[in-house]
Amino acid sequence: MGALSAMRLLSNHFERLVRSIDVPVLLEMIRRVEPLVYARYFKGFRAQTIGKKRVVEAMKREVLEKQNEPLSELLALLWNQKNRELYREMLNLVRTIDENVEQIKAIEDEKAKEFISTLEARFPKEDILICVRLNEVKFSEKVISTMLEGKKLEEEVHKTEQEDKKEGGEPA
């Protein structure tokens, strides 16, 4: 999975991801890496006067609609730089499993839950989710969806509905 795939998974959190990056830094990097994108959306504007809303909309169009891989990689890099404390802390936690983090195939659910709990003490859950997705941390989808995305697993929802029917209540 690359940065573009991660961005698609983070589409509900895309605005938060882009807004956390400093606009002048982002625009300068876009100007260097993707000059056509820069010209299309930002030419003629001063970096200090461009609103974050305009930047978010342009990035959404380029990354999520036009599938611009280099731009998605740039956003991932800049997000990791801006949120380096979270990135470093996640890296240090994952290194407790194996110093060479690239060799890790999967992180056990209990360990993943422990890591998330540790990080939640200092960082917002949404930022932890962004970090996990962008950096391809090897947590199971079950842990990611329940602990970070706040989704109930379908089987849990089904069990709850079945229990409600037995009790004569309406499903939630």
Image: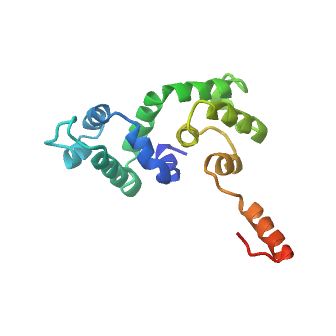
- Work out whether residue 53 or residue 63 is closer to the camera in this orientation and state it: 53
Q: Work out whether residue 79 or residue 147 is closer to the camera in this orientation and state it.
A: 147
Where the C terminus falls, by quadrant? bottom right
Image quarter of residue 38: top left
- Of residues 36 and 158, the one nearer the viewer is 158
- Which coloring applies here? rainbow
- Which residue occupies 39% across, 37% down? 74
Residue 14: give x, y in percent of width and height: 44, 48
Residue at the (66%, 39%) spot, across then down: 138
Instruction: Say which quarter of the image contains residue 78.
Output: top left
Residue 42 vs residue 29: left or right? left
Residue 140 rendering spot, x and y as whole percentages = 70, 46
Question: In the rendering, at what x and y percent does residue 39 appear?
Answer: 19, 45
The residue at 74%/64% (across/down) is 157
Q: Is residue 18 visible?
A: yes
Residue 107 makes an appearance in the image: no
Residue at position x 53%, y 39% from top?
A: 127
Is residue 94 shown left or right of residue 166?
left
Q: Nearer the viewer, residue 84 or 75?
A: 84
